[in-house]
Amino acid sequence: MEDRLDRRALFWTSTSTLVLAALLATVLHEASHAVAGLVVGRTSTLYPFQVVFDGSATTGQEVATAATGPAFSLVSGLVLLAVSRTWGHGWVRLLWTWLSLVSIQNGVGYLLIAPLAPAGDTGRVLALTGAPGWVSALSLVAGVVGTLALSWVLATRVVRWTRDPDELRAIVIFPWLAATGTVVVVQLLVLLQVDAGADVVVTVLAAAVAVAIFAPMFSFFYRRVDVPHEDLGLGPPRVPLVLAAVAVLLVVLVVARGVPVG
């Protein structure tokens, strides 16, 4: 019975932490677009899945603001990934891990969909700069390689923190399913409040589904990982559950209405 309760707590802690990380990574990604707009002299309105800029812009300004999001997500994610090995304890360590991986996925995910989704950041940059077809193909390959690399990194972390396949499922697979479903619902609630074109809707929902797509693919690698066990020190999931609920409410009730920037 005790192991079962532990796995249940593990599931709720990991799920709520992943939801919190996904929403934080997405809003910070969009905020970086808005900040880039200010740098090049553009005011905007920030939404949970996009930034709407005021007035017209030059091609250079559009390229700069579009490219900043994936670049910010990649760099911030890599920094967090490096420090998450030692930062914090318990669910806080789990938060830094999920946040770093989801942030990097925001970057590599846009590389992955660039050839198929011109409404996405990287696809827009390629279209604006008139990049040849081989650049799109290279972007796709980089996205696939990057996603698989994240799966391997996740495997090295969770194998260290768990003792058996049941705990692995409780910390990765089931939370990935539950958190992805939650993020999709949140984005649907946001989309109902804004006037978005069909291409934007498709891109937003695809990004929500793929927010942690690297997670289930950790199963390709975890059997090859041999690391000493580390007690993550997880307690009851109350704090991450409350913080995740607050984040959902803020996104749906506040940011979805638009936050003026500049």
Image: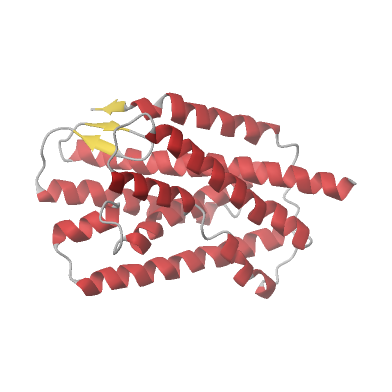
56 left or right, relative to 4? left
**Residue 19 position in % (x across, y down):** 55, 41
Q: Against 19, is 216 above or below?
A: below
The picture quadrant where one finds residue 215 is bottom right
The picture quadrant where one finds residue 191 is top left
Q: Against 182, is 108 above or below?
A: below
Tell me the residue at 45%/44% (across/down).
Answer: 25
**Residue 221 position in % (x across, y down):** 62, 71
142 left or right, relative to 241? left
Tell me if residue 90 can be seen.
no
Tell me the residue at 45%/33% (across/down).
Answer: 189
**Residue 231 position in % (x across, y down):** 76, 53
Q: Looking at this view, name the residue that lies furthest to the right.
A: 1
78 left or right, relative to 89? left
Count of labels in the image:
0
Tell me if residue 10 can be seen.
yes
Tell me the residue at 85%/50% (across/down).
Answer: 3
